[in-house]
Amino acid sequence: MKYFVAGSTARTASSLVGIHHNSGIRFFHKLREKIALKQHQRSEQFSGNVELDESCFGGSRKGKRGRGAAGKVAVFGILKRGGKVYTQIILDAKASTLMPIIRCKIKPDSIVYTDYWRSYNALDVSEFKHFRINHSKLFAEKHNHINGIENFWNQAKRHMRKFNGIPKQHFELFLKECEWRFNIASPKEMVEYLKLVLKEFYEVSAPILIISE
């Protein structure tokens, strides 16, 4: 667990611990499954100053870049300034896709900050107070910026790069791991969190032995 928290790959951790690499891979996969499950169970809504943005992960560098790039996974992110982040894989970045997520995760009358992506036009006539930053001209204008969520994207991509490619079927597990790492931050707290999660899982899943007289 400590090597996982430190960001080691499963193969490196297995070598250091002295077990077969397949055992390490399975254990790390199980940790990511439990983390993702817990992250999906979060029901809190964001309020106050909130930043919104989308990003693309993976895929080839050739051809179209940015929004809509072929072979990439699109992700939408919501970040409470000074607080936590929430991420969700999306099929596209249309207003019809983003607005239901925004309304579900952010309380009305919150202040939301975005870039000039056209899908965010819907926020101008919504229950939110909307500010936009034009990245073609500047990246911050006093309180008007989305530097927090962009910092998260950078952290997440830097963490994922060390794995030299992540299968698409497992991408969400790695994404939720990055969300979890950002939200907890303290390595010591991460270890304690994993201990509690695994204890809870094995207590629930442990078979009950019935002995008849």
Image (tube, rainbow, N blue to C red):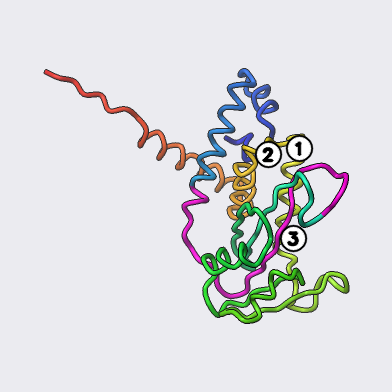
Amino acid type shown at disc 2: Gly
For label 1, the residue is 162
Amino acid type shown at disc 3: Glu
Residue 88 has which mark? none
Residue at 74% over, 46% down: 72
The boundaries of the magenta stretch are 38-65
For label 3, the residue is 150
How would you rate the neighbour count of disc 1 (Cα within 10 Å): few for under 14, some for 14-19, many for 20 or more? Answer: few
Please say if the residues under marks 3 and 1 sit with CB atoms less than 8 Å apart. Answer: no
Residue at 60% over, 64% down: 83
For label 2, the residue is 7
Q: Check the picture and name the quadrant holding the N terminus.
A: top right
Amino acid type shown at disc 1: Lys
Using the image as rendered, state which of residue 120 and residue 37 is in the foreground: 120
Q: Is residue 53 magenta?
A: yes
Which quadrant holds residue 20? top right
Spatial distance from mark 2 to mark 3, Cα to Cα? 21 Å
Q: What element carries label 1?
A: loop
Q: Residue furthest left?
A: 213
Above or below: residue 207 compared with residue 182: above
Q: Position of residue 173 (x, y in %)?
A: 60, 42
Report the mark closest to the observer, 2 or 3: 3
Above or below: residue 199 compared with residue 176: above
Please say if the residues under marks 2 and 1 sit with CB atoms less than 8 Å apart. Answer: yes
Q: What element carries label 3?
A: helix
Above or below: residue 25 compared with residue 123: above
Relative placement, left or right, of 2 versus 151 is left
Using the image as rendered, state which of residue 207 and residue 181 is in the foreground: 207
